[in-house]
Amino acid sequence: MAAEPILEMRGICKSFPGVRALDHVDLTVQRGEVHAIVGENGAGKSTLMKILAGAYTKDEGEILFNGSPVEIYNPLEAQALGIAIIYQEFNLAPHLSAAANIFIGREPRARFLGLIKRRKIREDARRLFEQLGADIDPAEEVGRLSVCCQQITEIARALSMASSALIMDEPTSALPEAEVQMLFDVIRRLKSQGVTILYISHNIDEVFEITDTITVLRDGKRIGTRPAADLDREQVVHMMVGRTIEETERREGVQFGDEVLRVEGLCRDDVLQDISFFLRRGEILGIAGLLGSGRTELLRCLFGADRKTSGKVYVDGHPCDIRHPIDGVRSGMGFMPEDRKQQGLFLGLATRENVTAASLGTVARFGLVNRLAERGMVDGYIKSLDIRVSSQEQKAVNLSGGNQQKVVLARWLALRPKVLLLDDPTRGIDVGARAAIHDLIVSLADQGVGIVFVSSELPEVLKISDRILAIADGQIMGEFTHDEATQEKIMLCATGAAVRS
Amino acid sequence: MTTAVPPDEVATATTMEGREEKVVSLWSRLKRLFSFREAGILFVLIALCVILSIVAPRFLTLRNVTNVVRQFSVIAIMSVGMTYVIITAGIDLSVGSIIALSGCMTAWFLVEGYPIWLSVLIGLALGALTGIVNGLLIVKVRLAPFIATLGTMGIARGLVLALTMGYPIQPFPEAFEVIGRGYLGPIPIPVVIMTVVVIAGHIFLSRTTIGRYIYYVGSNPTAARLSGLNVGRILILVYTVAGLLSGLAAVVLVSRLTSAQSNMGTGWELDAIAAVVIGGTSLAGGEGSVLGSLIGAALMGVIKNALILLGVNVYWQSVVIGIVIVLAVALDAWRQSRRPV
């Protein structure tokens, strides 16, 4: 006889203005398991979990917790049941200690004047960290902790509020590779203590490593639930996306054109030191480096977003003095920033306006915008890049991550750049859209655009780059052609050892 | 500016010859006409006018309507410039003081016997100059717009006081008074000037490249810079326009009065801001329209007129306007919160 599931959600429906986020979704979670909720961006995973955590209220459907029906109208009610959620973006006060953060708003107070019992807080925090198997000093200022430790602090807080079921929303999105294992150790420990964990992710490899059961959502509907052992990667991708994805292959035997970009001795304060490299037409140059290695700073300096201290840059053989993005654009460069929401998009404006932001002059005469020409141009890019929008007027904030990225790409394509600088273009984008973007990058290179492509995901860099530079501490540590490159060699350079290829 | 226009519902109909033709239903055409962003506030204005014409029959007379429109035309002109500023997520507190500065300087030159065109030009130039100073303080010195314009507000007012020593400047040559008191047919000249400014301001903002850049800068200045836009130049431009239009408003105002006083325009910056906010422009920047601000100014003008016609104590005007502002902003906040993010 099967044990009673700890949680059952039946027929859950939720709509927002203009969007049906969840359509009769069922979910059954067994006690003590690590259950993954997987799907593309916009599939409804966060929405479903937020309903469980009390952040949203369902429109229809019922929830059974430990066999009895419950209504969850706010987070406090969820916590009373023993359910807490850990969000992707941390809600920590950086200047307070870890212990203080854990008990924020719920501090145990002495009867005398209601003063906060500091020692009790520290002791309780220490106990929680022990339970999680983490070596964190409760008195340490949270802002000084590593990202992983901050996350564990968040987990400790959730645990102290509710210990039956923890929901983790994309827990590894902020973590560098090395620290992901630390998180997984904590999860395994929690599991051994009988805590049920709901794990939202679109990273399929992780899901196979740490979870027991996988539920796949697509477009607000539940596609299937199976034990992780019964599935393989392709099947999950197929369920997520509804079709099989063909991985982009690097082009073979391509002839590159003339040199389109040459950088000599580029320096910027102590952030970039003596960077030199070249790029040919039609070539994809991958730049691999860890966070803080200077890879973003390099692209920004080239484009003019930041000022270089010294060094020379040549585009198409002409020396260029680039001090401001205006210069970068004039020299024929385009730049897609790492953080598309904060730096790339005009969220409140229409898709059409986002696309033409850099090239408005080309559809205007005597300073007056030609609406018809503009619409035609934007239509062209919507078709050629397969941007899914309900209309050109749809606001950028309402687009999915992958489509938003395509909009930013379209902005630069409209200028027919010679060089495209892409900073982590597939960050936060799910499998289906990722492959589409890789395809676009390769086809752009085929058309003769020189591409500099920064990413922290080595497999991605290896897959589509023609040549790879490894960067660490603001210096180029190694250069590899596609054939020579291996993950190990690049990782070695990126962690600081200079290698001559 | 970007209207969330629902796509036309397209139906296929068969013409007499049997060919299929796409027909846009009349209903969806009507829906599109009324879904533009200013529809809500325009409806409120029209409703108010209708109610008023029933409750106070004197409202709808030609004389009263002409007066009302002439009254709010000065604020309306100021609010066009303020619209530009607020779309960039900034604010300009100095426009009230610019009214005094430009107005008194124009008056002074007139009284000293200089030609009208020169005196007017000087008034406009002073307004523009103050705007440039605001822009430079914000862009080069990197002061917050609130602080920068608060400073110029005080400086400008102080200059006027120093100049006039508190005495009114008068009298003006009769020819000058045409601007404020003359008519073009049945329409007062201030109204003509307001109409021209509003139309030009609207077209510039919604149809030109630079107008569009203003929206980009307001929506996300970082992204604007990274898209190759000269954010600094655009900001200096909007504050200059705000100053220039305030200078123009000053000229119109002064020519209606018999003298120019150093306390002119005190507090009018808040009226201009109110008109813009009531008209649907968000203080957060990135959206808004000149037409909306015109409706906002008109609404405030009609409300003031209503209170007078109904014999309400003049001091209640501020209370009512204040309530209208709060309601308008609350409505805007509610609309924003309904967006699925």
Image (tube, rainbow, N blue to C red):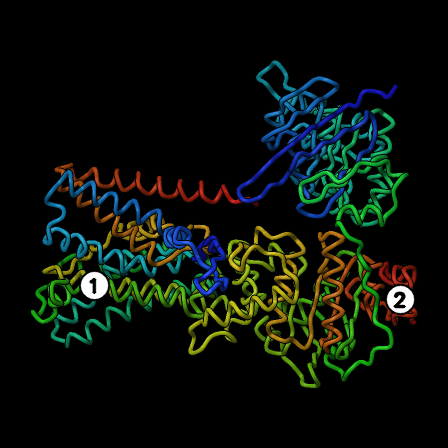
Label 1 CA crowd tier, 10 Å (few <14, some 14–19, many 20+): many
Say which residue appears at 39% left-offset and 59% top-offset.
B85
The chain identifier of the residue carrying mark 2 reads A
Considering only vertical position in the picture, is A13 above or below B299? above
Question: Is disc 1 placed on a helix, strand or loop?
Answer: helix
Can you see residue B89? no
> Which is more toward the observer, A264 or B160?
A264
Left or right: A337, with A180 as reference point: left
Could you say where residue B300 lies in the image, as x and y percent from the top left? 25, 47
Say which residue appears at 10% left-offset and 50% top-offset.
B61
> Which quadrant does the C terminus of chain B fall into?
top right
Q: Which residue is mark 2?
A: A498
> Which is more toward the observer, A177 or A145?
A177
Image quarter of residue A332: bottom right
Say which residue appears at 69% left-offset and 48% top-offset.
A41
> Which quadrant does the N terminus of chain B fall into?
bottom left
The chain identifier of the residue carrying mark 1 reads B
> Which is more toward the observer, B341 or B125?
B341
Say which residue appears at 83% left-offset and 77% top-offset.
A254
Could you say where residue B302 lies in the image, as x and y percent from the top left? 21, 47
> Which is more toward the observer, A304 or A267?
A304
Task: Give the Cα separation between the discs numbered 2 and 1.
Answer: 70 Å
Left or right: A268, with A203 as reference point: left
Can you see residue A279? yes
Label 2 CA crowd tier, 10 Å (few <14, some 14–19, many 20+): some
Q: Which residue is mark 1?
A: B103
Q: How many marks?
A: 2
Question: Is disc 2 placed on a helix, strand or loop?
Answer: loop
The amino acid beneath tag 2 is Ala
In the rendered image, residues at marks 2 and 1 fall on the same chain: no
